[in-house]
Image (cartoon, helix red, strand yellow):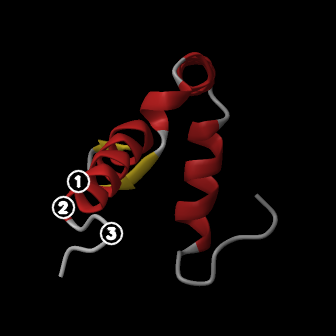
Amino acid sequence: MDYGLVWMRRDYWESLCHRWATGPWQERSHAAKRNQAAHLEKNMQTSGSVSYATHNQKLETYDRTIADRYAEGTP
């Protein structure tokens, strides 16, 4: 709380810090951390709502398609 943001009024910053310190906010924060830890493949975002796992799968499919299409000796 001591190192407020340059672009935000000090009273707004202090209000947010107090809100983040409340019980309900902390409970939601801890629940979110547990959910992220339990589902690592679902929480890594690369582009919009596409997860890292989905993006990686598409790249592997693309690599195979290109390799098949442009096999050695194909113009």
Mark 3 or mark 1, whichever is nearer to me:
3
Where does label 1 land, which residue?
65
Q: Nearer the viewer, residue 75 or 16?
A: 75
User: Which residue is at 51% across, 21% downward?
Assistant: 39
**Tag 1: residue type?**
Thr
| Circle count | 3
Q: Quadrant of the C terminus?
A: bottom left
45 w.r.t. 35: above or below: below
Mark 2: which secondary structure? helix
Q: Name the element at disc 3.
A: loop
Q: Where does label 2 land, which residue?
A: 69
Q: State the CA–CA distance, disc 3 to disc 2.
A: 9 Å
Toward the right, the furthest residue is 2
The residue under the point 62% across, 27% down is 22
Give coordinates of residue 13: x percent, y percent: 59, 62
Q: Position of residue 48 (x, y in %)?
A: 27, 54
The image position of residue 74, as x and y in percent, is 20, 74
Q: CA distance from mark 2 to mark 1?
A: 6 Å
